[in-house]
Amino acid sequence: MRAIDVHVHPPTVEYLAESGGPFFANAFGVSKKLETFDSLKKTFTDAGVQKAVLLAWDAETHSTRPRTRNEYVAEIVKQYPDFFIGFGSVDPWKGQKAITELELFKSSYGFKGVKFHPPAQGFSPADPRFFPMWDLIQEQELVVLAHAGHTGYGAGLPGGGGVRLAHARPFPDYEILANTFPKLKIICAHPGWPWHEDLLALAMHKSNIYFDLSGWSPKYIPANVIRHAKSLLQDKCLFGTDYPVISPKRWIDDFIAMDVKEDVLDKILYRNAAGLLGID
Ligand SMILES: [Zn+2]
């Protein structure tokens, strides 16, 4: 078995306590999950995962929480070059500063993609004010990993901590994005619940929309998503854990238990991600 996890957050103070803080209070049991990158790598390689996409985080404007810096993620990737693949983050509300930062993604940081969390960042992916940013991402050929569907971020807080789930609706926002930037490769993160049917339709219709199955044990992912992942959308679906939300061993064990054909399993665990990220 071979596998690439396309969705891993740093299980460290920088991300969980500083960037997340009260927004993760009801999501991860955060304080219990702090660990080192050595132990993380062991957890993954023990589970049969050879590579993992490590994510930065910048939602400073909307959340007023500190970011998990691009420099920080780039440094970790440099320490584990055969294991981690870096995805940076920019806060769209930072305007020119975000653009200037994006220009460093490939040349300085060696990143392969950009992570967005529109509900945490408080923006709509289809807002034309951010089109210059998307245009640059498309031009730089950076892969986009963007949150879709319900989120644990802000869950259980009064008013959801000011977080809007509307910013995570696959339709119409990600359709507008995919239409406007047809060369932009967009991985909608998570099965998109409760709009998973919309997400399936988008992934079927747009060659540049993919989705990962992270954040959920496959056991609890809506049956129709699994059915499509095993059949019509087997080339558009990717393995991800949203670590530290779920462990790679549990995810993979639960998925294998769903009678996935070997060739399809290899696509979802490895080949689809390898193709998108330019890995042999
Ligand atoms: Zn995530």
Image: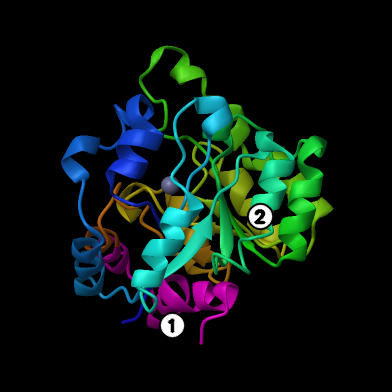
Q: Is disc 2 placed on a helix, strand or loop? A: helix
Q: Position of residue 170 (x, y in %)?
A: 63, 42
Residue 158 magenta-highlighted: no
Q: Is mark 1 within 8 Å of ligand 1?
A: no
Question: In the drawing, what numbered circle is on residue 186?
Answer: none
- Is residue 161 placed above or below 16 in the rendered structure? above
Residue 154 visible in the displayed image:
yes
Give the quadrant of residue 169. top right
Residue at 44% over, 34% down: 66
Give the quadrant of residue 276. bottom right
Residue 278 magenta-highlighted: yes
Magenta range is: 252-280
- Answer left or right for 81 relative to 11: right
Residue at 61% over, 32% down: 167
Question: In the drawing, what numbered circle is on residue 102?
Answer: 2
Q: Which residue is mark 1?
A: 263
Give the quadrant of residue 27. top left
Amino acid at circle 2: Leu
How has the structure been colored for display? rainbow
Question: Which quarter of the rendered picture does the N terminus lie within?
Answer: bottom left
